[in-house]
């Protein structure tokens, strides 16, 4: 990712949060990023490409923050709690605080969005696989692998964020996921 594009992508995220994916235009993004429309189009062919780049930057930051936090944790339980602090709660808050944020998910229905969503989910699953690799033997007792549990965690994380009625509901769902992970790895 071109680091020169980071301010542009941060501005684009703000626009997507304000207007939602469908109503956002390249003109909105250019204005928010203090660029001319031709300058924006020189970087990205359309808003689908901008969306894909925004998603990639968001996931890159989240994974970097998780890895940094996990490096100073002593237990898997602490690492799972950092997943709540860094990924799940902030994502839920973003979706519930900004009325049009849930529309951003619809950006993943575009061809570029689908490719970006698949790539970012693969990156998150890979981070989880590395987290769970030391528990390969314990998972094997239950007929699971780090990869299987990592996919399960990512899919459930996304579903919880999208379906929880409020923060208490989200916390309850997360507590169940955390208990399952700890049971499978002990």
Image (cartoon, rainbow, N blue to C red):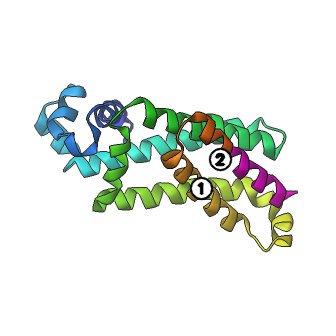
Can you tell which mark lies on residue 156? 1
The relative height of residue 19 versus residue 117 in the rendered view (above or below) is above
| Crowding near the residue tagged with mark 1, few <14, some 14–19, many ≥20 C-alpha atoms within 10 Å | some
Residue 176 counted in the magenta span? yes
| Crowding near the residue tagged with mark 2, few <14, some 14–19, many ≥20 C-alpha atoms within 10 Å | some
Residue depicted at x 50% and y 32%: 93
Where does the image place residue 183, in percent across and percent down from the top left?
83, 57
Quadrant housing residue 186:
bottom right
Labelled pair 1, 2 in contact (Cβ < 8 Å):
yes
The residue labelled by disc 2 is 173
Give the left or right position of residue 32, taking residue 77 as reference: left
Where does the image place residue 144, in percent across and percent down from the top left?
75, 70
Where does the image place residue 6, in percent across and percent down from the top left?
37, 34
Where does the image place residue 184, in percent across and percent down from the top left?
81, 61
Quadrant location, the N terminus: top left
Query: What range of the chain is rendered magenta?
Result: 174-186
Badge 1 marks a residue whose secondary structure is helix
Badge 2 marks a residue whose secondary structure is helix
Residue depicted at x 23% and y 27%: 32
The relative height of residue 106 versus residue 114 in the rendered view (above or below) is above
Question: Which residue is more in the foreground, 153 or 147?
Answer: 153
Residue 65 in view, yes or no: no
Question: Which residue is more in the foreground, 125 or 7?
Answer: 125
Residue depicted at x 63% and y 53%: 127
Give the left or right position of residue 131, taking residue 153 as reference: right
Q: Earlier in the sequence, mark 1 or mark 2?
A: 1
Residue 143 counted in the magenta span? no
Kindly report the distance in space between the C-alpha atoms of the residues bearing marks 1 and 2: 9 Å
Give the left or right position of residue 40, taking residue 80 as reference: left
Magenta: main secondary structure: helix
Residue 88 in view, yes or no: yes
């Amino acid at each position: 990712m071109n680091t020169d594009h980071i301010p542009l992508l941060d501005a684009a995220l703000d626009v997507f949060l304000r207007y939602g994916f469908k109503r956002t235009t390249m003109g909105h993004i250019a204005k928010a990023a203090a660029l001319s429309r031709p300058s924006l189009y020189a970087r990205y062919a359309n808003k689908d490409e901008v969306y894909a780049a925004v998603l990639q930057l968001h996931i890159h930051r989240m994974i970097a923050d998780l890895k940094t936090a996990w490096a100073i944790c002593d237990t898997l339980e602490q690492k799972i709690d950092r997943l709540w602090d860094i990924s799940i709660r902030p994502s839920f808050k973003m979706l519930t605080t900004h009325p049009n944020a849930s529309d951003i998910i619809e950006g993943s229905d575009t061809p570029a969005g689908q490719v970006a969503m698949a790539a970012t989910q693969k990156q998150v699953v890979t981070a989880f696989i590395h987290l769970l690799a030391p528990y390969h033997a314990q998972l094997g007792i239950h007929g699971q692998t780090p990869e299987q549990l990592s996919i399960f965690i990512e899919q459930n994380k996304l579903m919880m964020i999208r379906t929880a009625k409020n923060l208490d509901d989200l916390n309850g769902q997360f507590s169940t996921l955390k208990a399952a992970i700890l049971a499978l790895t002990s």
